[in-house]
């Protein structure tokens, strides 16, 4: 028969909750507001420099550098530094020749969850870091 005291069980559950919920570097694959991962949106895809809707550039047009709206959403177990690193990693993947940052903002989404504490349901505060910005690729 295995005996586990309450302190050991609480420590084990705390360690498991901290390691199991941290974001992995990956795209967001769910619509849950608690999911972690990156999303990018290619900006200015439509008409540039007199291009037609069939994407044939005119004779006088110059190729325009790609611009992306890049978002990395962390989970409640992530740090701001970890999410910033993931945001920069994705920016480097999108623009292998380098990029300029047009705007970059890190925000914290505050929320609450209900969880049992000492046999009672309590509201606990949560923090979820989100990095969002616009980058322009260098060609």
Image (tube, rainbow, N blue to C red):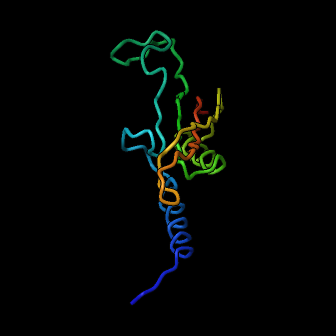
Kindly identify the residue that appears in the image at 54 percent across and 22 percent down: 64
User: In the current view of this chain or complex, which residue is farthest to the front?
Assistant: 119
User: In the current view of this chain or complex, which residue is farthest to the left?
Assistant: 54
- Where is 51 relative to 7, above or below? above
Residue 131: image location, x then y, percent: 59, 37
- Where is 18 relative to 34, above or below? below
Q: The N terminus is located in which quarter?
A: bottom left
In the figure, is residue 53 to the left or right of 9?
A: left
Q: The C terminus is located in which quarter?
A: top right
In the figure, is residue 6 to the left or right of 51?
A: right
Total marks shown come to 0
Asked which quadrant contains residue 99, the reply is top right
Camera-side residue: 114 or 30?
114
Camera-side residue: 1 or 26?
1
Asked which quadrant contains residue 126, the reply is top right
- Where is 72 relative to 82, above or below? above
User: In the current view of this chain or complex, which residue is farthest to the top?
Assistant: 50
Residue 48: image location, x then y, percent: 48, 14
Residue 6: image location, x then y, percent: 52, 74
Residue 8: image location, x then y, percent: 55, 76
Kindly identify the residue that appears in the image at 46 percent across and 85 percent down: 3
Camera-side residue: 23 or 62?
23
Kindly identify the residue that appears in the image at 65 percent across and 27 percent down: 103
- Where is 112 relative to 135, above or below? below
């Amino acid at each position: 028969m295995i005996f586990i005291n309450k302190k050991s069980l609480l420590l084990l559950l705390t360690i498991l909750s901290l390691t199991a919920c941290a974001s992995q570097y990956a795209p967001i694959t769910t619509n849950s507001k608690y999911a972690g991962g990156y999303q990018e949106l290619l900006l200015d895809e439509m008409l540039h420099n007199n291009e037609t809707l069939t994407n044939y550039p005119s004779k006088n047009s110059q190729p325009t550098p790609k611009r992306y709206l890049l978002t990395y959403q962390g989970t409640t177990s992530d740090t701001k530094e970890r999410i910033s690193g993931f945001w920069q990693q994705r920016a480097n993947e999108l623009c292998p020749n380098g990029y300029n940052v047009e705007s970059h903002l890190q925000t914290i989404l505050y929320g609450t969850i209900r969880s049992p504490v000492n046999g009672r349901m309590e509201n606990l505060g949560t923090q979820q870091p989100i990095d969002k910005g616009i980058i322009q690729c260098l060609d």
